[in-house]
Image (tube, helix red, strand yellow):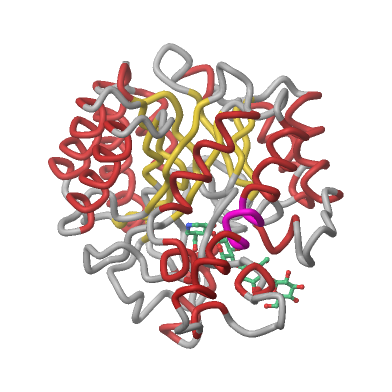
Amino acid sequence: EVPSLAERYKKSFDIGAAVEPSMLEGTNGAMLNRHYNSIVAENVMKPISIQPEEGKFNFEEADKIVKFAKENDMELRFHTLIWHSQVPDWFFMDKEGNPMVDETDPKQREKNKKLLLKRLETHVKTIVKRYKNDVSSWDVVNEVVDDSGELRNSPWYQITGTDYIKVAFETADRFAAKDAKLFINDYNTEVEPKRSTLYNLVKEMVEAGVPIDGVGHQAHIQIGWPSLQEIEDSINMFAALGLDNQITELDVSLYGWPPENAFPTYDKIPASEFERQAVRYDALFNLYERLGDKISSVTFWGIADNHTWLNDRAEQYSGVGVDAPFVFDVNYNTKPAYWAIIDEE
Ligand code: G3I
């Protein structure tokens, strides 16, 4: 058996993996137990899974992941209390069934805002109370800034301004365990103009007393992008605000953006690609380790190359195609990237 990743990085941070409830058994289960000491749900804890209809909470799938984490003594990240995607429409409909975003009357808009914040509060409160003793890190809001560096113009924002962020954190804080950490999570946190917008938003909120404990950096990155310097600067910026950092959805795509000319099948990926990827992983984990006191957890957005959302991405842009973003291959065997990150001391 090869050395455990979690064991290797124990002194610096947790090593996590995103899973579906179907990925807790067999080889996946064994991999989780050997290499990871933290898990997160890839989909089943999102608003649309947990509260598809108002007041009808569905915890069945989420519970499976919570149970696995408990039984195997793993940390659990919760992803995600609030998001603009994978959220059911009912949140944003007024009592008459009209979309709140279309309302023009100021009085009615004020009422709608109240109603939406109430729904948000109920959602957050119900979940956080249920999993209070199980979750160590909460993604409270996800992707509230967009790529152009504006606050994301989601229904949440259109109806409440930034109040939804504030209320989400305050509600989570009221019901979460005292030592649990509350995160604002996003992708491309390394690159301008998004990085500065996120920084300014977080700084303002922290100064106003909003209980944010840390920044989740998704890290859906590529072999050549973003630069190590940008990654380091971003971690340092948020750490300087007194915040924790977690790497929450790490994958290192073989491709640029968009992923055109993807390799059609896994066996068509040349070995040189895996070598290139290993160099990147080596540099990345050297950096994470060097910044270890500012990073409490590094989670991969999957376990092995046989299951990754990036395959859908590759297919979408190339017609056919697969990606290979992790350190274990489609058969759970170690890739050069694994040896690159297990080695360095
Ligand atoms: O569950 C349905 C299934 O019933 C149906 O037959 C099938 C047909 O397409 O779709 C299934 O739902 C899919 C779902 O994943 C569960 O597999 C959705 O279509 C698909 O869009 C969804 O994709 C997820 C995506 O978030 C949604 O935006 C990916 O698995 C998941 O990896 C991805 O994760 C996000 C993070 O939450 C936030 N950061 C970015 C990251 C990658 O996009």
> Is residue 234 toward the left or the right of residue 10 in the image?
left
x and y percentages locating residue 295 in the rendered image: 36, 26
Q: Quadrant of ligand 1?
A: bottom right
- Residue placed at 62% from the left, 62% from the top? 115
Side (left or right) of 209 relative to 52: left
Q: Considering only vertical position in the picture, is 192 above or below 335?
A: below
Pick out the residue farthest to the top: 11
Q: Quadrant of the N terminus?
A: top right
Could you say which is closer to the camera, residue 106 or residue 120?
Answer: 106
For residue 33, which quarter of the picture?
Answer: top right
Furthest residue toward front: 107
313 vs 288: above or below:
below
The quadrant of the rendering that contains the C terminus is top left
* Residue 197 in the figure: left or right of residue 104: left
Which residue extends farthest left? 229
- Residue at image location 45% in from the left, 28% down from the top: 297
Q: Position of residue 102 (x, y in %)?
A: 50, 85
Q: Is 188 or 338 nearer to us in this picture?
A: 188
Q: Is residue 190 magenta?
A: no
Front-lying residue, 268 or 253: 253
- Magenta stretch: includes residue 117: yes
Q: Is residue 232 above or below residue 84?
A: above
Q: Which residues are magenta?
A: 115-120
